[in-house]
C-alpha cells in the first residue's frame, strides 16, 4: 500500500523541475515522467528482472506500483493531457478541456467536475484500506461481541 501511494504521485515529481529548474517554461506533462512509453519500458524491465531472478511472487507488488503510475497517467489524460504516443508523436490526448476561470490554476482543476474521478479513486483506496485494517484486527472477545458494558460484566461476575 505505501509503495502504491508513492507510485501514484511519482509522475508528478517533475513539478520540482517545472517550478525550480525550468521556471514553468515547459508544461510538466511533457517531461519523461508523464510519457507512458518510458514507464512501459521500466515496467517490462522490472517484470523481466523478477522472472529471471525467479521472484515471480513479487510481480503482484510491481503490478500495484506500476498500475498506480499508469492510473495517474490515465487520470491526467482526463483533464490535463498526456502524450500517449510520445516520443513518436507530440500530440497530447485530453478528454476534457478545463477552462481557466480562477486566479490560481489549481482551483480550475479542483473545482471542475472531473476532479470527482480522482476523489472516487481516493475513496475506493480508503475503503480498501479500512477493509484490510478490519480484516487484520483480532476477533472481539466473547464479552465484547455481546455488546455488554464493563459495568454489566462487573455486575454479572459479582
Ligand atoms: Zn501528473
Image (tube, helix red, strand yellow):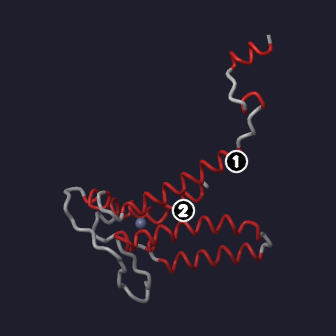
Please indicate whether residue 111 sits to the left or right of residue 135 in the image: left
- Seen at 35% across and 85% down, the residue is 91
- Figure quadrant of the N terminus: bottom right
Give the CA separation, mark 2 to mark 1. Answer: 25 Å
- Ligand 1 falls in quadrant: bottom left
Please indicate whether residue 16 sits to the left or right of residue 58 in the image: left
Report x, y in % for residue 82: 39, 76
- Seen at 49% across and 77% down, the residue is 36
Q: Nearer the viewer, residue 96 or 52?
A: 96
Please indicate whether residue 6 sits to the left or right of residue 137 in the image: left
The correct choice, above or below, for 10 with respect to 140 in the image is: below
Label 1 SS: helix
Label 2 SS: helix
From this viewpoint, which residue is outermost toward the top? Answer: 158
Give neighbour class at mark 1: few <14, some 14-19, many 20+ (Cα, 10 Å): few
Give neighbour class at mark 2: few <14, some 14-19, many 20+ (Cα, 10 Å): many
> Which of the numbered marks, if any, corresponds to residue 103?
none
Please indicate whether residue 44 sits to the left or right of residue 154 in the image: left
- Seen at 43% across and 63% down, the residue is 12
Residue at mark 1: C-beta within 8 A of ligand 1: no
> Which of the numbered marks, if any, corresponds to residue 7?
2
The correct choice, above or below, for 129 with respect to 115 in the image is: above
Residue designated by label 1: 135
- Figure quadrant of the C terminus: top right
Residue at mark 2: C-beta within 8 A of ligand 1: no
Amino acid at each position: 500500500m505505501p509503495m502504491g501511494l508513492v507510485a501514484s504521485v511519482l509522475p508528478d515529481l517533475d513539478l520540482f523541475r517545472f517550478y525550480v529548474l525550468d521556471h514553468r517554461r515547459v508544461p510538466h506533462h511533457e517531461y519523461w515522467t508523464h510519457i507512458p512509453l518510458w514507464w512501459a519500458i521500466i515496467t517490462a524491465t522490472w517484470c523481466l528482472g523478477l522472472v529471471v531472478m525467479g521472484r515471480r511472487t513479487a510481480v503482484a507488488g510491481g503490478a500495484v506500483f506500476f498500475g498506480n503510475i499508469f492510473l495517474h497517467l490515465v487520470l491526467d489524460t482526463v483533464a490535463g493531457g498526456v502524450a500517449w504516443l510520445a516520443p513518436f508523436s507530440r500530440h497530447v490526448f485530453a478528454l476534457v478541456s478545463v477552462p481557466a476561470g480562477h486566479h490560481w490554476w489549481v482551483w480550475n482543476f479542483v473545482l471542475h467536475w472531473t476532479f470527482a474521478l480522482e476523489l472516487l479513486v481516493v475513496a475506493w483506496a480508503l475503503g480498501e484500506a479500512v477493509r484490510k485494517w478490519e480484516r487484520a484486527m483480532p476477533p472481539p472477545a466473547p464479552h465484547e461481541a455481546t455488546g455488554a458494558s464493563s459495568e454489566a460484566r462487573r455486575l454479572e461476575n459479582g
